[in-house]
Amino acid sequence: MSPREAAELDNALKKREWILDSTRTPRELLEFEAISRQQLGWTGADLVAKALTVRISEIADASSLRLERHTVKLVYLTYALAALTLALLVVEVAHYFCKP
């Protein structure tokens, strides 16, 4: 169901269900809110605003978790690079002092 169709529903429970559906994108919620605000007498705009805030927070949370995983990988790779650098330094020092 499109945001326009949902906004034009007469059944308040169906509207509420549509708003609170976790598959709604922020764009759909904004479109629904804009259409609903044009209709006189509809007082559920606060619910739409709250649902929009929650949806944006969920998206931000998912992004932050992904960023955290990549950061952990980057830290491990940095440790591996430091260990490799140290190993190369040891080989070079050993090669320098063991020259015939």
Image (tube, rainbow, N blue to C red):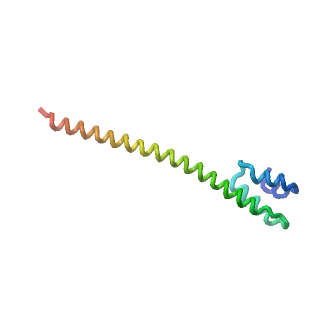
In this view, the residue farthest toward the top is 100
Q: Is residue 47 above or below residue 87?
A: below
Q: Is residue 34 above or below residue 65?
A: below
In this view, the residue farthest toward the left is 100
Q: Is residue 89 left or right of residue 46?
A: left
Q: Which residue is painted at 19% across and 36% down in the image?
A: 94
Residue 23 point in image, percent of width and height: 71, 48
Of 12 and 82, the residue lying toward us: 12
Q: Which residue is painted at 85% across and 66% down in the image?
A: 41
Instruction: Count numbered badges in the picture.
Output: 0
Q: Is residue 12 left or right of residue 19?
A: right
In this view, the residue farthest toward the right is 10
Q: Is residue 73 above or below residue 47?
A: above
- Residue 4: name its quadrant: bottom right
Residue 69 point in image, percent of width and height: 51, 44
Report the quarter where the C terminus lies: top left
Residue 92 point in image, percent of width and height: 22, 38
- Residue 42: name its quadrant: bottom right
Q: Which residue is painted at 63% across and 51% down in the image?
A: 58
